[in-house]
Image (cartoon, rainbow, N blue to C red):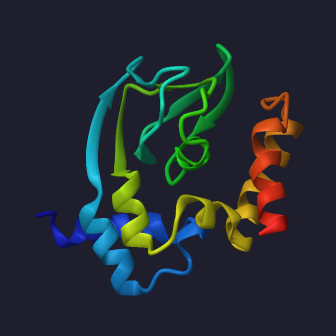
């Protein structure tokens, strides 16, 4: 069992991500209790390119580096997520690799099935929610502006689904 103060910190992290906005306060607490803590060290590879991603990663402490096709594409910091788009792609090979870029990191993880049960929606529904797509659009726009994202192709598939759905 996690300390109540720690659970409250995890609840705040969840609440700052728009994909969890539809959850009740109780659901935020249940999900916060369910998150697994993953302690990592600098240089540790969390996800390899072409690996099927089966869990959501939430950065609690530290910095992660996301590489696409072997090149750095994004830096992830406290509150940032990794894994939703990759889980939605199911068994499609993904070019993403995820590394710890700080001396150490504390990540919060939840397996796909548990995430869908706790959130009471599918990964696709999370991605197509209006607020979730606004945050994703802003993030992609920022990545394009700073030259960290060379292609919108991985994101356009989900934007199209959101418009059609």
Question: On the rendered image, what quadrant is the C terminus found in?
Answer: bottom right
Identify the residue shown where x is 27% and y is 36%: 39
Q: Is residue 87 above or below residue 131?
A: above
Which residue sits furthest top? 70
| Total tally of numbered discs in the picture | 0
Q: Is residue 54 above or below residue 125?
A: above
Q: Is residue 57 above or below residue 18?
A: above
Left or right of residue 104, residue 94 in this image: right
| Quadrant in the rendering for residue 106 | top left
| Quadrant in the rendering for residue 72 | top right
Which residue sits furthest right? 145
User: Closest to the observer: 65 or 113?
Assistant: 113
Which residue sits furthest front? 91
- The x, y position of residue 17, in whole percent, is 56, 65
Question: On the rendered image, what quadrant is the N terminus found in?
Answer: bottom left
- The x, y position of residue 37, in whole percent, is 26, 47
Identify the residue shown where x is 19% and y is 72%: 4
User: Closest to the observer: 119 or 88?
Assistant: 88
- The x, y position of residue 68, in whole percent, is 67, 23
User: Closest to the observer: 161 or 79?
Assistant: 161
| Quadrant in the rendering for residue 115 | bottom left
Identify the residue shown where x is 26% and y is 51%: 36
Identify the residue shown where x is 44% and y is 27%: 102
- The x, y position of residue 59, in whole percent, is 45, 46
Q: Is residue 20 above or below residue 66?
A: below
Left or right of residue 132, residue 54 in this image: left
């Amino acid at each position: 069992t996690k300390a109540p103060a720690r659970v409250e910190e995890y609840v705040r992290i969840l609440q700052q991500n728009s994909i969890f906005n539809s959850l009740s306060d109780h659901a935020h607490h249940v999900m916060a209790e369910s998150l697994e803590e993953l302690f990592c060290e600098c240089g540790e590879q969390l996800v390899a390119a072409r690996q099927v991603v089966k869990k959501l990663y939430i950065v609690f402490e530290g910095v992660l580096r996301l590489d696409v096709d072997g090149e750095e594409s994004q830096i992830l910091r406290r509150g940032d997520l990794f894994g939703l788009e990759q889980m939605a792609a199911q068994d499609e090979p993904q070019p993403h690799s995820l590394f710890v870029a700080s001396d150490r990191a504390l990540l919060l993880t939840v397996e796909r099935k548990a995430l869908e049960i706790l959130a009471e929606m599918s990964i696709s529904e999370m991605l197509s929610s209006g607020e979730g797509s606004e945050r994703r659009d802003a993030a992609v726009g920022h990545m394009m502006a700073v030259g960290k994202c060379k292609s919108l192709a991985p994101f356009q598939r989900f934007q199209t689904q959101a418009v059609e759905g």
